[in-house]
Image: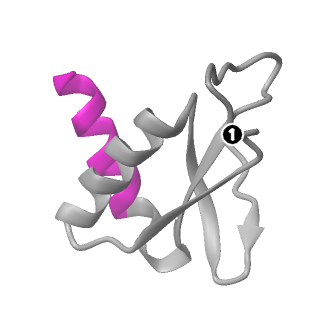
Amino acid sequence: MEEKEFGEFVELASAQGEMEAEILLGVLNSEGIEAMSQGDIAQGVHPFTVDGLGRIRILVRNEDLARARLVIREYRERE
């Protein structure tokens, strides 16, 4: 995956909705990795994802990228 830069942060992964994004942010933060989310979700009663709409990017500092990938991979394997 090609990393996209957002200031000093780079894209680590994407989530399909706010709930998944919050879980991934919590996993990263619990390991001491600063992370944030960025997305274009229109707030509403029934959020949905179609063709990438509603996709939320998970961003980490470039220097944390390798460790963050490992943390997320291990989390997803345990899921």
Magenta span has 14? no
Check the image and report above or below for 66 versus 49: below
- The quadrant in which the N terminus is found is top right
Give the x, y percent position of residue 37. Answer: 56, 58
Residue span colored magenta: 67-79
> Type of residue at label 1?
Gln
Q: Residues within 10 Å of mark 1 (few under 14, many from 20)?
A: few
Q: Residue at x 37, y 54 (%)?
A: 25
Check the image and report above or below for 60 versus 23: below
Q: In this view, does 1 lie to the left or right of 73?
A: right
Q: In this view, does 35 lie to the left or right of 12?
A: left
Circle 1 sits on which residue?
43
Give the x, y percent position of residue 46. Answer: 62, 19
> Looking at this rendering, what residue extends furthest in the bottom direction?
8
Q: Nearer the viewer, residue 17 or 79?
A: 17
Q: Residue at x 63, y 66 (%)?
A: 10
Give the x, y percent position of residue 49. Answer: 70, 20
Q: Residue at x 64, y 24 (%)?
A: 47
